[in-house]
Image: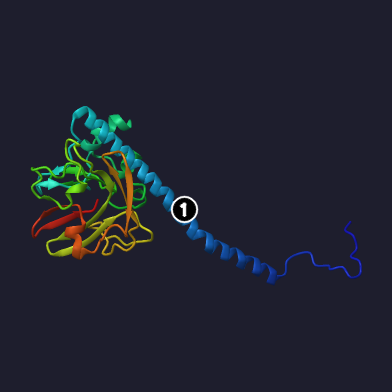
Amino acid sequence: MGRDHQPGESSRDGFTLVELLVVIGIIAVLVAILLPALSKARRSAVNTQCANQLRQLGNACQMYLNEQHAYPDPLFVAAVGGDAPSAVCASLLNELSPYLRTPTLTGAELTTQLPPVFVCPFRAEIDLFGQPQNVGGFAYWLTGYVYCARVNEVGNVSGTVLRAADIADMRGKHRGVLWADTLMYSTSGATPLGYSFFHMSGGINFNSSSGTSSTYQPWSCQNRAWSDGSVDTVNSADVNLNANVVATSAAYVCSIPGVFAYYYYF
């Protein structure tokens, strides 16, 4: 049996509506404060994962160099007469598989079926171009990473090095970028196609046919794995992505005048 209330004692057993609304309001404020911090922490964790994967790819290239006395061949697209760093093919990944303990690939796998180390974790969150791409009979994936080594070779007719200091040569004689997150600017003839990247600080609308964005504003950062084993991160304070200065700020361009131009930043 419950006890009787004594005179002067309150008989209220719960919250009033006003008190409940105050509590809900406080919770809403806390959520609004914490969610951006949690989102930032998550992006930071995923970026750390991405940098670690690039470090593994760079180390695999170094072990390959030690055995073969050259870095693996990039994908040379005969149809355009040049190397396309963002076109990551099965032959390249299979050259590195013994050092990464990954299975041999056929080239027919979906991007989601590739070993995670080969796919940028931010790119893995975007449902776009999951099927292998094909240009002139060459199959490749858009993994969110670009293979940057050896683009300075003579046979790369449609490729032009714009910043030689960042290029890893075939024999590894000087420091250069081996792998990096995708960061590109493309044109078709005289028509800008826009920017390609997967590290971003907010939402973005991609052109579903070209996989590009008309703006670079959501871009947040790029990780780069160097031939000395280091991995660094650059952001908007380090790279000028304005289309008017792309020829001096990008590191490499694969192009056929009047047809297309793919500018790579790394």
Residue at 25% in and 37% down: 93
| Image location of residue 157, percent across then percent down | 8, 47
**Can you name the residue that lies furthest to the bottom here?**
18
Q: Nearer the viewer, residue 140 or 100?
A: 100
Q: Position of residue 98 (x, y in %)?
A: 28, 29
Q: Picture coordinates of residue 172 (x, y %)?
A: 20, 37
Whether residue 228 is visible to the viewer of this picture, yes or no, is yes
Give above or below for 44 relative to 213.
Answer: above
Q: By what rule are the colours in the image chosen?
A: rainbow
Q: Mark 1, residues whose alpha carbon is within 10 Å: few (<14), some, or many (≥20)?
A: few
Dividing the image into 4 quarters, which one contains the N terminus? bottom right
Rendered residue at 41%/48% (across/down): 46
Of residues 113 and 25, the one drawn nearer to the viewer in this rendering: 25
- Toward the viewer: 57 or 238? 238
Q: Nearer the viewer, residue 173 or 215?
A: 173
Badge 1 marks a residue whose secondary structure is helix
Q: Is residue 233 left or right of residue 260?
A: right
Specify the quadrant of the image occupied by residue 67: top left
Query: Residue at the location (20% across, 42% down)?
Result: 168
Q: Is residue 113 visible?
A: no
Name the residue that disc number 1 marks.
Answer: 41
Whole-percent x and y of residue 126?
34, 53
Q: How many marks?
A: 1
Identified by mark 1, the residue type is Ala
> Relative to residue 20, is residue 64 depicted above or below?
above
**Left or right of 198 on screen, residue 32:** right
| Residue at x 18% of width, y 58% of height | 248
